[in-house]
Image: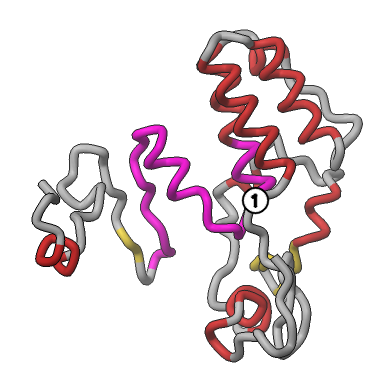
Amino acid sequence: MPASTTDALSGQSAIGYVYLVNKEYYLNPNGILNDTQWRQADKRRSLLQANGDKQYLKKYAKASPYVDYIPVIRYAEVLLNYAEAAAQAEQLTIAGSLLKAVHQRSDASFEFPGPALASKTAILEAIAKERRIELLGEGLRGYDLLRQLKELPAKGDANIQTPSVPTTAQNYIFPAPNTELATNKLFN
């Protein structure tokens, strides 16, 4: 979705400011950043910026007034959604082809290891990793984890950490807002 100077957000409301200028969020060095599925040769690595020992996302790198295009849905996301649906339906050949199409456009020499495409469980794991790489910084991982009924991982570093949230926890799914409960008498 295009942003224009008349619609521009400023300061802490702008994605470019939060991710790159203010450097509030850096990538976890033990997370997807160092996964073997995301090799150093991958062109998507050009969307990262090193600052000391930390890596920052520069996917939204325009300067103030921060008018980067904001993705709503991208073709790569559509292909990965289709790949996931095909894998769930045990159409592993289709799922593998779609997964390769997304990954190899940014790292043409990458070959998924045979076991990664051999079973429904393995290919779903490879698709989930690919979504983390491809859609990094686009705000979709939480929804992916909820949709797949996976635990929400702990976040933070040694100084400040948010604990993980297991699927059985009361706060795994947020309750309906009180305003909705108060105004919608049909809500159960």
Bounds of the magenta span? 129-158
Quarter where residue 108 is shown? top right
Identify which amino acid the numbered label 1 is placed on: Ile
Residue 33, given in percent of the width and then of the height, sits at: 65, 50
Question: Measuring 78% from the left and 41% from the top, which residue is drawn there?
Answer: 39
- Res. 184 image quadrant: bottom left
* Residue placed under numbered mark 1 in the picture: 73
The 10 Å Cα crowd at callout 1, few under 14, some 14 to 19, many 20 or more, is few
**Which image quadrant: the N terminus?**
bottom right
| Residue 77, placed above or below residue 136 | above
Furthest residue toward right: 109
Q: Tell me what residue is drawn at x 34 percent, y 34 percent.
A: 149
Residue 1 placement, left or right of 183 = right
The image shows residue 35 at horizontal and vertical percentages of: 64, 40
Q: Is residue 177 rendered to the left or right of residue 1?
A: left
Whole-percent x and y of residue 62?
78, 79
131 part of magenta stretch: yes
Q: In this orientation, which residue lies closer to the viewer: 174 or 132?
A: 174
Q: Is residue 179 above or below residue 133?
A: below
**Magenta-span inclusion, residue 3:** no
Res 50 visible: no
